[in-house]
Amino acid sequence: TPLDIYDRIWWPDNFKNVERISTSSNVNPATSLFQPPVTVMQSAIIPANGSSSFWFSWESVSTVFKYYTCMYFSEFESEQAETRSREMNIYLNGRFWSEIPPPQYLNTTTHRLTATNAQQYVISIMQTKNSSLAPILNALEIYQEKEFLQLLTNQQDVDAIMKIKSKYEVKRDWQGDPCAPKVYMWQGINCSYDANQSPRIISINLSSSGIAGDIVPYIFSLTSIESLDLSKNSLTGPVPEFLAELQSLRVLNLSGNNLQGSLPSGLSEKVKNGSLSLSVDGNRNLCPSASCKKKSNKFIFPVLASVVSFCILLALLAILQNLRRRKQAGKKKGSLELENRKFSYFDVLKITNNFERVLGKGGFGTVYHGYLDDKQVAVKMLSSSSVQGYKQFQAEVELLIRAHHKNLTILVGYCDEGANMGLIYEFMANGNLQAHLLEDKADTLCWERRLQIASESAQGLEYLHNGCKPPIVHRDVKSANILLNEKFQAKLADFGLSRIFPVEGGTHVSTTVVGTPGYLDPEYYISNRLTEKSDVYSFGVVLLELITGQPVIQKTPQRTLIGQWVSSMLARGDIKNIVDHRLQGDFDTNTVWKAVEIALACIHTISTRRPTMNQVVIELNDCLAMEIARTKAHETAPDGTPDELMIDLNLHSDVFPLAR
């Protein structure tokens, strides 16, 4: 079997009615994320007897199973790559799925396909009308998804152990989830299991693993760890203080390394009181107590301390002076930008023609239509009884001055004149998303447009979380706060409740709970702990609105939340009745499934198990690309599938790559 960096086992195909071709040239696998072996990519199949297509199929034991297919393509002949085209389309169960760009000469391209909700799957690869060459397939993988009934490992532990693995270049077979399923727990790892909580890593044994360098700080994130064995390696540097702060740590083996300095007093104290078993023998330059350091530095320390203190003082004075200059420059710049966008109340009266046309009303006040330099604008005036208040008004002005993104509303200017406070925005001709979803409009948003709106809104939110320094949490993501311009481009609006994280890298802030019922993160509501994942929850609710066209709280005596309603429908395998009936079936079931999965992941009750907005953007863009390909397809699938070209795949045979 060929050498595989992911340790898969590959087998030659047993397909019929196909012709096998090969090349002795090296095919570059690195252009594919999944990197099939070179020897696998050096062979391929094409239809036999001059046919323009071939098919393969498999039977599913159950319609609820999900399959992931990876197809690999490469062009062998340089003359063909330059003068003739090899264009292909993929069909799934007789329906157009996607077009495949012409394979690159001696490079690997990958095409992925997700299949679900069927008893039999038939995938056909067909030559297009514009193609002068028959379709080609170099390699194929099909995976059946296995559902984990067990909870996945605590995300903080996963992040920590993955960083440890990367930093120390651990050579063990550490793939997948560290603790789940239990029978596949990582080598050298032990975990604790509780029926109602995610597994926690409680023991790591990296003895004799060839690791080197300092003891990494990521270990401190493993707050449940009880035993840590780093013995017989090439670790250097001091023993870090944070090891003494791991409250659950009972056994620590650092013997047989090249550590130096003295032991932290916290560790020594734990050894004395019997709460920690510590092994440090074999570290020749490591002093077993803090007193060694004191003795050796008895005479040198006073002089050295004086010199260092003087240098630090000079450095601090220089830094403070530099910061003062920057702060003054920043204040001048910020004040100038604010002043340039400030309008008087008299200006606002002229812009709105004495508040002639009302666009909408809310808890903050009223939004009016207006014109500024012949361009349409929307003016939001804060009422004296507004629940938003002056602090929120200030927050929105300051945020929009510093945050610039194509999917955030643009602040044209503001008015702050006594009791008259207002914000002047670009005009969004198609209003807010909620109105399009919950009101009977002549033009229903098509499925592609809904995915586009979801993707663009997600990009705006992702910018607040990752593009702003420090990060910003919106705190009131809902369909009414997603505005649509004349081209239906989505922009996130209403930042009056937004919260800036005071410390970069902070995991949360404690804050008074605000938001809109139905969109509010239950974990945030209970704990008052605000994180970016609170926005992720709210966005998941918006995505369910886009899919279903249903209100976020059902108008029933039970007042069922939209997420609960969707879950109950899915439990019956009823995906099509979840989708907004106004779409009249004009959508691809696979993209709907994918969108529902993303939404349900976003509204997970445990915030650490929700995706980041960056992950959501990637998944939604995949959904959108699939739907665009479907709507652009003008070619129709063939009537029927010739039996003589059908390739029946037995998923339990040795035709497919397997884990070693």
Image (cartoon, helix red, strand yellow):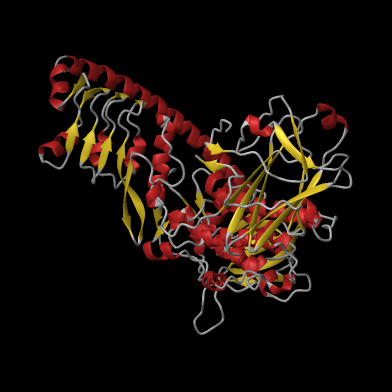
Task: Using the image as rendered, state which of residue 290 and residue 286 is in the foreground.
Answer: 286
Classify 494 as above or below 132: below
Residue 375 seen in the current view: no
Q: Does residue 400 appear to the left or right of 274 in the view shown?
A: right
Q: Position of residue 537 (x, y in %)?
A: 51, 61
Classify 133 as above or below 359: above
The residue lying at 15 percent from left, 39 percent from top is 270
Q: Position of residue 238 (x, y in %)?
A: 27, 26
The residue lying at 32 percent from left, 19 percent from top is 311
Q: Position of residue 42 (x, y in %)?
A: 69, 31
In the rendered view of the protein, which quadrant contains the N terminus?
Answer: top right
Q: Position of residue 386 (x, y in %)?
A: 53, 69
Residue 490 seen in the current view: yes
Task: Using the image as rendered, state which of residue 46 and residue 567 is in the foreground.
Answer: 46
Residue 75 quadrant: top right
Residue 9 quadrant: top right
Residue 576 quadrant: bottom right
